[in-house]
Image (spheres, rainbow, N blue to C red):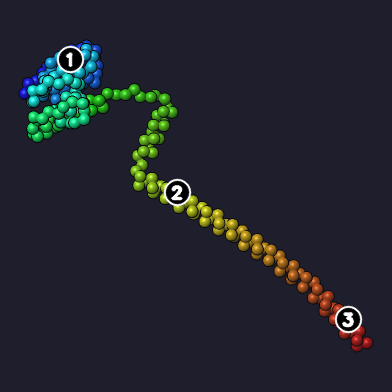
Amino acid sequence: MTSQSYSGTGSASESGSISSSQNENLSPLWDYVTKIEKQRTIGGTWNFRCNICGETRSGSYTKIKAHLLQNSGEGIAICKKVTKNQKLEMVRLVEEWEKKKKGVTREVSLPCQSQDGVEIESSSKKRKSSLSPLARSFDMNTRAQLDEEIARMFYTVVCLLILLEILIITGLSLLLQLIIYLVMFPLVIINCNHITSTRKK
């Protein structure tokens, strides 16, 4: 298996930044092909020869990956001489490389907002998102139970007020009847006595 030196690393170090095409040049899959000629001064399109099947193709890293890993539908013929063990080994190397690349990307710090409003908003969103769906469900159930208790208490108070009003009206009516009875009863007795005394005479 022939290894090919990577092109463009000098310019990348001089500029101090690594582009996506230059980053792809670090992929271990380049060890399975031989670069012949770069088609453009900018970009990652190469004429290459597959070290496994010996065929000459052209394309970017995506095409090389599709050729070696036998991914059809990528606009390039697949390598028919790749063995199962070689394919598994290449998949493992690509996965390890992509994990390492993602780890380097995470280490790059993003510019943070220093405004208080943004910080408060982001922290509140974090607190909201920290609640699991189960916790949110319990919170909704608790709120529903509280609403039911408030409605039940309001209904009970209304019923008590209506009952009290009925009792007050009924009590006033009975009191009025009692007053009338107490006032009229002596008059009736006096009237009866007067009639009895008149008859005796």
Q: Which mark is residue 194?
A: 3
Quadrant in the rendering for residue 124: top left
Q: Are marks 3 and 1 in contact (CB under 8 Å)?
A: no
Residue at image location 34% in from the left, 22% down from the top: 111
Of the two numbered discs 2 and 1 in the rendering, the one whose residue sits closer to the viewer: 1
Of labels 2 and 1, earlier in sequence is 1
- Residue for badge 1: 38
Q: In the depicted view, which residue is nearer to us: 120 or 21?
A: 21
Give the quadrant of the N terminus: top left
Q: Are marks 2 and 1 in contact (CB under 8 Å)?
A: no
Amino acid marked by disc 3: His
Quadrant in the rendering for residue 133: top left
Q: Which mark is residue 143?
A: 2
Residue 107 vs 195, above or below: the answer is above
Residue at image location 49% in from the left, 54% down from the top: 149
Of labels 3 and 2, earlier in sequence is 2
Amino acid marked by disc 1: Lys
